[in-house]
């Protein structure tokens, strides 16, 4: 029974971490190198993350600079950014690729909050699925006579408490991200 609880808790922890990672890709009013995480460049036939073939930095709150180590990568990095759904326009001056982040409009902020809400709902569904899996595992243990019916009820109650606390963490995370996005 303890194993089922530990497994469920660790999986719920991973769901919260996954939501935080998704949120790091959402653009707020400030430039962040995390915006480019997960963006791959077709470098000599191999999908390569940008940070593995260039140095990426944020010299100020509205600019991201990318300096590829290989001259041949300039055009590839530029194309990858343009093809992405980030809505960013890179400017290549031959030595550096600059990405200017325009201030977010009110409509764009509201859209980003909707996207954050969608990510939060997906994470909640994942947590609830973990709860269902844990409850099924407990029921199987009870069916196999490894635990009593009282232990089953107690285990289900503990899993429900854990689920409620992780859903609350997800809601707090969303509220924090929403505040960050709507901040001007």
Image (spheres, rainbow, N blue to C red):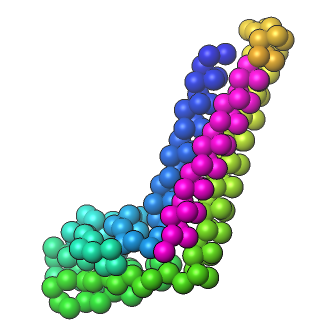
**Residue 159 location in percent, x, y?**
71, 27
Residue 26 or residue 70, whichever sits in front: 26
Q: Is residue 29 magenta?
A: no
Residue 135, position in %: x, y?
Answer: 76, 28
Identified at 63% across, 23% down, the residue is 5
In the current view of this chain or complex, which residue is farthest to the front?
184
145 in relation to 46, above or below: above
Left/right placement of residue 86 relative to residue 170 reads: left
Residue 180, given in percent of the width and then of the height, sits at: 50, 64
Q: Position of residue 140 (x, y in %)?
A: 77, 20
Q: Which residues are magenta?
A: 155-184
Q: What residue do we see at 79% from left, 21% from top?
A: 139
Q: Is residue 37 visible?
A: yes
In which image quadrant can residue 133 be found? top right
Q: Is residue 177 magenta?
A: yes
- Report the quarter where the N terminus lies: top right
Q: How many marks?
A: 0
- The correct choice, above or below, for 12 with respect to 80 in the image is above
Quarter where residue 107 is shown: bottom right
Foreground of the two, 48 or 86: 86
Residue at x-position 21% and y-position 69%: 55
- The dominant secondary structure in magenta is helix
> Is 42 situated left or right of 20 in this image?
left
Q: Which residue lies at the image location 69% right of the left edge and 55% below the top edge?
A: 121
């Amino acid at each position: 029974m303890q194993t089922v609880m530990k497994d469920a808790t660790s999986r719920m922890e991973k769901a919260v971490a996954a939501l935080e990672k998704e949120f790091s890709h959402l653009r707020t009013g400030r430039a962040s190198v995390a915006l480019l995480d997960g963006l791959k460049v077709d470098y000599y036939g191999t999908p390569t993350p940008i940070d593995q073939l260039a140095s990426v930095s944020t010299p100020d709150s509205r600019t991201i600079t990318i300096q590829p180590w290989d001259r041949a990568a300039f055009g590839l990095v530029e194309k990858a950014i343009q093809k992405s759904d980030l809505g960013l326009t890179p400017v290549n001056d031959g030595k550096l690729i600059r990405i200017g982040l325009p201030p977010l409009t009110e409509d764009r902020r509201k859209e980003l909050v909707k996207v954050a809400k969608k990510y939060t709902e997906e994470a909640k569904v994942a947590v609830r699925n973990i709860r269902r899996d844990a409850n099924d595992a407990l029921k199987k243990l009870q069916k196999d006579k490894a635990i009593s019916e009282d232990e089953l009820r107690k285990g289900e109650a503990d899993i429900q408490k854990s689920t409620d606390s992780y859903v609350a963490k997800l809601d707090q995370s969303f509220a924090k991200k929403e505040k960050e996005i709507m901040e001007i």
